[in-house]
């Protein structure tokens, strides 16, 4: 079964709204279980990033297998959601932000498909890591649906699963980060290496360490995600129904070979 569109995130709203087919895709990096649903005439692939039981921590996610599986299914456009902590006082808990750039502070992940081959050394252009066309379409859809969308954000990615210290958050703010999370890298990089359009919406579930008093409450995070993800996924599906075109961006032509 082929599909041009995919959503990567937690357990999706599709599970209660659409009939889905579970399939397993074999890749050289491992086998991936995912769901495919027919939605508004489109075949949509859904990947639960942390697994169906939410049991895979961020530093153990098989990012390369996930993205390779999507490529084998013919996916060209990906929307993702990311739970994030805010470093920006203008983005309080409950805000939706659109990721535009990232800082990579991971240390132990497989970051690329380009580990050397007879094809020579390859690099990937990252001047537009999160697809400009998908971002534009999401902004338009958010405005049309009167969704409280706060703005753009620079994302800093850490390995986790621990949260960041107050000193680390101070450093990240100095470097220009707006939000912090544990999953967007290398996901966004691998999508670009495979010529896919990739965009991600950040759901601010808490203020980062030291940004406000009191410990982070996991119950509040779960509640925040459940409130936001249905609205976001519905907008993703509406955008896919408009048949986004890769000719309106440069995601499919980002590789530089030497």
Image (cartoon, helix red, strand yellow):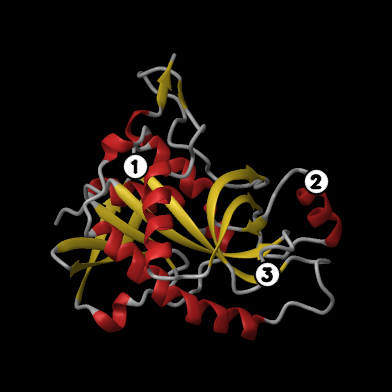
* Residue at the spot 81% in from the left edge and 61% down from the top edge: 165
Per the model, the C-alpha gap separating discs 2 and 3 is 19 Å
Q: From where the camera sits, is residue 48 visible?
A: no
Element marked by disc 3: loop
In depth, the one of 21 and 226 nearer the eye is 226
Query: Mark number for residue 174?
Result: 2
Which label sits in the foreground, 2 or 3? 3
Query: Mark number for residue 9?
Result: none
Residue 222 in which image quadrant:
bottom right
Per the model, the C-alpha gap separating discs 2 and 1 is 31 Å
Left or right placement of residue 210 versus residue 100 in this view: right
Which label sits in the foreground, 1 or 3? 3
Residue linked to disc 1 = 196
Crowd rating for badge 3 (residues with CA inside 10 Å; few <14, some 14–19, many 20+): some
Q: Position of residue 151 (x, y in %)?
A: 57, 57
* Residue at the spot 52% in from the left edge and 70% down from the top edge: 148
Crowd rating for badge 2 (residues with CA inside 10 Å; few <14, some 14–19, many 20+): few
Left or right placement of residue 176 versus residue 233 in this view: right
């Amino acid at each position: 079964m082929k599909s041009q569109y995919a959503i990567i995130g937690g357990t999706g709203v599709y599970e209660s709204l659409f009939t889905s087919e579970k399939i397993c895709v074999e890749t050289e990096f491992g086998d991936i279980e995912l769901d495919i649903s027919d939605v508004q005439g489109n075949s949509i692939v859904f990947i639960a990033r942390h697994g169906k039981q939410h049991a895979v921590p961020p530093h153990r996610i098989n990012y390369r297998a996930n993205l390779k599986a999507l490529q084998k299914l013919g996916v060209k456009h990906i929307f993702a959601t990311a739970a994030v902590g805010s470093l920006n006082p203008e983005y309080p808990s409950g805000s939706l932000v659109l990721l535009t750039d990232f800082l990579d502070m991971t240390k132990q992940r497989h970051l690329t498909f380009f580990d050397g081959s007879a094809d020579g050394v390859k690099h990937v252009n990252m001047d537009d890591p999160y697809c400009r066309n998908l971002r534009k379409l999401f902004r338009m859809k958010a405005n049309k649906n009167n969704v409280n969308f706060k703005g753009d954000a620079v994302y800093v990615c850490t390995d986790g699963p621990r949260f960041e210290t107050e000193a680390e958050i101070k450093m990240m703010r100095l470097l220009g980060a707006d939000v912090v999370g544990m999953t967007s890298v290398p996901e966004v990089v691998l999508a670009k290496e495979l010529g896919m359009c990739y965009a991600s919406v950040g759901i601010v579930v808490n203020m980062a360490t030291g940004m406000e008093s009191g410990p982070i409450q996991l119950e509040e995070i779960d509640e925040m995600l459940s409130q936001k993800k249905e609205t976001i996924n519905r907008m993703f599906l509406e955008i896919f129904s408009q048949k986004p075109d890769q000719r309106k961006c440069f995601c499919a032509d980002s590789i530089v070979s030497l």
